[in-house]
Amino acid sequence: MNIELLSTGQAAAYLGVTRHTLEVWRSVGRYGLPFIKVGRLVRYRKTDLEAFLASRTRNESTG
């Protein structure tokens, strides 16, 4: 099994947000985006990021 893990900076770049934004989301539990803690290190599964983006995708305008 090959699980691609991304650092906070890499995950933020993948999502198109700043590292700080992702850190705030993690701190306050916003969006429930899963992450992995290994000691002081924080990692994100790429598959979780892809699922997050898919869940945020909208097909209609709500404006």
Image (tube, rainbow, N blue to C red):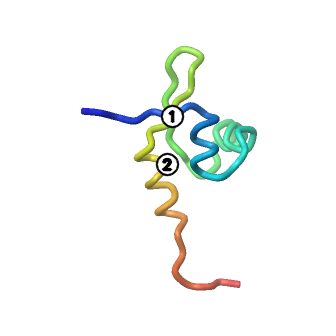
Which numbered disc flags the more N-terminal residue, 1 or 2? Answer: 1
Is residue 12 or residue 25 the one in the foreground? Answer: 12
Residue beneath disc 2: 49
The quarter of the picture where residue 51 lies is: bottom left
Find residue 38 and name its label.
none
> Which quadrant holds the N terminus?
top left
Q: Is residue 3 left or right of residue 33?
A: left
x 57%, y 48%: residue: 14
Disc 1 marks a residue whose amino acid type is Leu
Quadrant holding the C terminus: bottom right
**Label 1 crowd bin: few (<14), some (14–19), many (20+), radius 10 Å:** some
Name the spot of residue 42 as percent of width and height, x first. Answer: 56, 27
Measured as percent of width and height from the top left, residue 45 is found at 44, 39
Left or right for 48, reference 8:
left
Q: Is residue 57 above or below residue 19?
A: below
Q: Give amino acid for label 2.
A: Leu
Residue at (52% x, 30% y) in the render: 43
Residue extending farthest left: 1
Q: How many marks do you count on the picture? A: 2
- Are dots 1 and 2 in contact, CB under 8 Å? yes
